[in-house]
Image: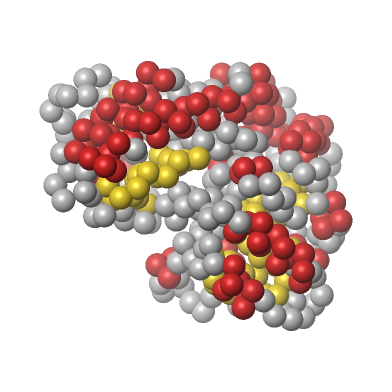
Amino acid sequence: MSTTSAPASTQMSPQTAALFEQYVIPNYKRFPLSLVRGEGSWVWDDQGEKYLDFFPGWGCNLLGHCPPAIVKAVQEQVAELIHVPNTWHMEAQGQWAKLLSERSFGGQAFFCNSGTEANEAAIKLARLHTPRERYKIITFEGGFHGRTWAAVSATAQPKYHDGIGPLAPGFVYAPFGDLDAVRAKVDGETAAIMVEPIQGEGGIRIPPAGFLEGLRKIADENGLLLIFDEVQAGCGRTGKWFAYENFGVVPDVMTLAKSLCGGVAGGAMLAKREVAASLRPGMHAATFGGNPLAARAGIATIETIENDGLLAAAEARGSLFRKLLEPLVAELPHVREVRQIGLMIGVELTVDATPLVQECMDRRLLINVTQGNVIRLLPAMTISEDEVREGCAILVEAIRSFKT
């Protein structure tokens, strides 16, 4: 694929467009592209066009599209047992929990289907674990915790609250990175602090030195739970199994989803054993949580990352992204900063970056823009050096030609 050819207009089947127009609620802003096949870091549309994907599955496809081990595991499992309720035992679910526990802080797992569900479980656990008068949870501006009522109430971004109030009570917002503000908001009704160790939707915002350590200290001094939302940053994306390892701070509770199952729907909440005991029988559930398909996919994801040395690959590819993109800061006045940790990359512009999504799509590269002015890339751990260079050449050309 040439990086210098003139952009081509994207298109899709009018029949597919008509189906969506008539039968699908238009709550998503969809691009005029119908994807039909994927392999690794590439996808194909229904017109036969091929795209390099720097944002596969909205961050869910950490191993790329259709990773062979996950495909094989799900194919085998679907012929044996698709779903049984959690009133029965499933060996794969137990094995999956063991693998996650051994690679994190030795806690226990509750399984669900998504990041917002994992965060709902963490919110309920925080209230169940602390005295009844303690119900408040401190969260952070720019954070994102999901779309269900409590999770969106925990999300300190007014744009997600428009028209759905009143919100769930008990959430107190603090500026990300400001320990003094957090201390000032702790009172006798505070139960927990909930934070993304690296803000994803907030623009790949990496915490200032000492911030997470300070939150741990505040939590310990006041008998609060420290909850890390690693829905986007966890499961190896930063080059370590979990983002908290980059900062030497261990949470009491951690939530996971997105890339947890290599593209298959799945979520989890991990909690230290003494905290997990507060989620008593009958207090919470998820009908499809930890189902055999998700469990087998989750196991295969962990095994693939380890067997293929993908933690080291994430660090190496992330460094290459930084090397190729950071020179733009000195070169172009409308490029403010490049932020990168593992395979979480943010390029912040001084102007609205939204048009670059279509511009890059026309050049056969898929990217994302968040917060209006941050190009967000969450590429697969399996991406090759050549693919990184090819995609970055397209992106750099698009940013250089961008009319500010």
- The answer to whether residue 338 of the structure is visible from this angle is yes
Residue 111 vertical placement versus 223 (above, below): above
Q: Which of these two is toward me, 46 or 400?
A: 400
Image quarter of residue 181:
bottom right
Which x, y percent locates residue 330? 26, 42
Q: Which colour scheme is used?
A: secondary structure
Residue 44 vertical placement versus 159 (above, below): above
Q: Is residue 272 left or right of residue 66?
A: right
The residue drawn where x is 55% and y is 58% is: 145
Which x, y percent locates residue 333? 21, 48
Residue 79 vertical placement versus 189 (above, below): above
Image quarter of residue 3:
top left
Q: Is residue 106 left or right of residue 267?
A: right
Which x, y percent locates residue 339? 42, 45
Q: In which quarter of the image is the N terminus?
A: top left
The residue drawn where x is 65% and y is 36% is: 241
Q: Which of these two is toward me, 340 or 196?
A: 340
- The answer to whether residue 82 of the structure is visible from this angle is no
The residue drawn where x is 49% and y is 35% is: 343
Which x, y percent locates residue 219? 73, 65
Residue 374 vertical placement versus 344 (above, below): below
Q: Is residue 293 left or right of residue 116?
A: right
The residue drawn where x is 80% and y is 46% is: 107
